[in-house]
Amino acid sequence: MSDVKTIRVALAGCGTVGGGVAEIVINRGEALAHRTGLRFEIVKALVSDASKNRDVPFDSSLFTDDPNELAAVDADMVVEVMGGTDRAREVVLAALQRSVPVVTANKALLAHHGVEVYEAARKGNTCIAFEASCVGGLPIIGALLRGLQANCNTSIMGIFNSTCNYILTEMLSGGASYADALKSAQQAGYAEADPTLDVGGGDTAHKLTILASLAFGLNLDGDNVAMEGIESIELTDLQTAQELGYACKLIGIGKRFDDGAVSLSVHPTLIPHGETLAGMNGTSGAVVVQSDVVGETFYAGAGAGSLPTASAVVADMIDVATGAAQKTFEQIRVYNDRTATPKHRDANERGYAYFVRASANDAASSVDKLKGCDVEWKHLAPNSQNDSAIAITAVMAESRFKNKLADIQETLSLAESPKFIRILPQETNR
Ligand SMILES: NC(=O)c1ccc[n+]([C@@H]2O[C@H](COP(=O)([O-])OP(=O)(O)OC[C@H]3O[C@@H](n4cnc5c(N)ncnc54)[C@H](OP(=O)(O)O)[C@@H]3O)[C@@H](O)[C@H]2O)c1
């Protein structure tokens, strides 16, 4: 095709996502060129170990472990899919300072250094695009930057981490403990050898920070997220919640209040089976946005993985090559180097109903003792399987609930605080 333009790409990182990008732009390059009029040519690829044997569809002489070599190459864009916040930050900033546009999948970098990176892009008269940084292949950033621009968004929430969703799904479907489900996720390649960032909620917090910044047009920082992971979730609670009509998911929730304050939180959450989020299992991801004009919109699909994530990276590469990304970056004022820093509302002020499991000797006496506590129970019943009382409270602020929890612990003479899981608020209260 004579009207096809060649775009020279410096690839920083060639692992799971980088390999997927190479697969799409080279092995599927003909179809891509036909659709877009663009042919992407990888002209250099930065990795940690350039001597490693790799199954890639380009010449292995293009590999280097020297970031200066990557910087020296004449490229139309840098695609950063290496991860981390040290070397990746240097590579990204160096490209932007040379006025070379960047596509990145790196949520940790943007959640903690977004302002610096966006400012560098503006100073360099160039742009950065990062669709793949949040929930893999879902085009949620495109939706926030383009599809929802007519709206004022009031909340954004969802299942942002595939590893956690896989583990919670495996626990319930296979009757597995958390530890066994984590092992199975590692064997299947869905969890890292060190899974802390995923299961502890940090990865969800990074994505929530980026998405809420764009959704609300505010300068939000990754350090302001109240965060709990899934490490202490027990199978018995997933099973009991299931019987009561709830699925348990690790949910990131960002809310903007009428006074402009914002709260960001990440925690395991029970979701009524009637809600679409409750049916998202395995490695799926999903995002729900509440907006003033369009109302609620829902986005779902593959939350991670080589090709799904690369699909989002390549979409950004096309947008950068056509100039669309540059226009959006210049014009749309939601990038947090140009937005105000809001007041953060303490997550303890958010209201939830709570699922509680408390165990004092046996199920019947646990129920009797809970009846005597000063809490409005919406549900209170014995569970003979685990010798405990299962209860659901009325909606109350988290700070108030935590006081009640301390009372319950004292009344039931428990060595540890009772187990609890928050329940997703009704749509109007999210
Ligand atoms: N995997 C997913 O499903 C997914 C989904 C969404 C977003 N992301 C994001 O995409 C990025 C890449 O993830 P990934 O899963 O593809 O990671 P990965 O498989 O570990 O690949 C990382 C690549 O970067 C290279 N690299 C890492 N540190 C380097 C350094 N200091 N200097 C030079 N090269 C370095 C590695 O080199 P070697 O090959 O020599 O080790 C490897 O090629 C991360 O920001 C991640 O958060 C991933």
Image: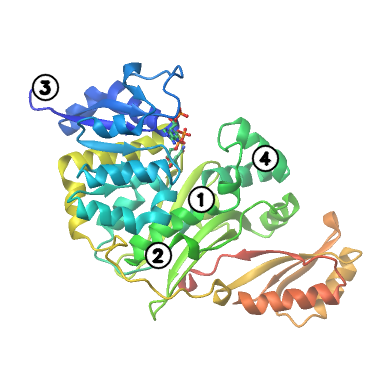
- Compare marks 3 and 2 and give the one earlier in the sequence: 3
- Give coordinates of residue 341: x percent, y percent: 36, 71
- Secondary structure at badge 4 equals helix
- Secondary structure at badge 2 equals loop
Q: Quadrant of residue 191?
A: top right
Find out whether the residues at labels 1 and 3 contact each other: C-beta distance under 8 Å: no
Q: Which residue was labeled with disc 3? A: 1
Q: Is mark 1 within 8 Å of ligand 1?
A: yes
- Compare marks 1 and 3 and give the one earlier in the sequence: 3
Q: Quadrant of residue 338?
A: bottom left
> Which-is-in-front pick, marks 4 and 2?
2
Q: Which residue was labeled with disc 2? A: 220
- Compare marks 3 and 4 and give the one earlier in the sequence: 3
Residue furthest left in the image: 2
Which disc, if any, is residue 203? 1
Q: Amino acid at mark 4?
A: Ala
Q: Residues within 10 Å of mark 4 (few under 14, many from 20)?
A: many
